[in-house]
Amino acid sequence: MTDKKKRIFLIIGMISLLFFGALVSNYNSFNKTKNSCFESNGKPTVEKSFLAINWSVSCK
């Protein structure tokens, strides 16, 4: 394998890892927000898009 191919695989791997980390972090924030609504005796109204990238929680 040439150096150029190794570099391309390394860059793709790093980008994939960063994207996966961002998704996990976003999902944890979403669950924490939802649970804090339950803790304050509210009922969360949740709107989210594919993979929970865009989400909104309103507590009533």
Image (cartoon, grey):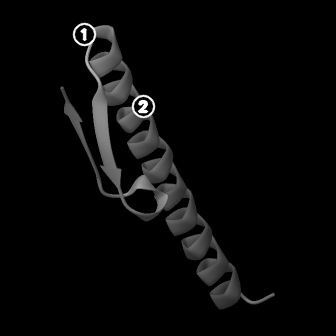
Which kind of residue does numbered mark 1 sit on?
Ser
Q: Position of residue 25 (x, y in %)?
A: 43, 41
Q: Which residue is denoted by mark 2 in the rendering?
A: 31
Q: Position of residue 36 (x, y in %)?
A: 30, 18
Q: Residues within 10 Å of mark 2 (few under 14, many from 20)?
A: few
Where is the N terminus found, in terms of image quarters? bottom right
Q: Which residue is denoted by mark 1 in the rendering?
A: 40
Label 1 and label 2: CA atoms lie apart by: 14 Å
Where disc 1 sits, the SS reads loop
Would residue 41 be found to the left or right of residue 30 on screen?
Answer: left
Would residue 6 be found to the left or right of residue 46 on screen?
Answer: right
Q: Position of residue 52 (x, y in %)?
A: 42, 54
Q: Position of residue 13 (x, y in %)?
A: 62, 67
| Residue drawn at the location 63% of the way across and 89% of the way down | 4
| Residue drawn at the location 66% of the way across and 78% of the way down | 9
Rendered view: 38 above or below 50: above
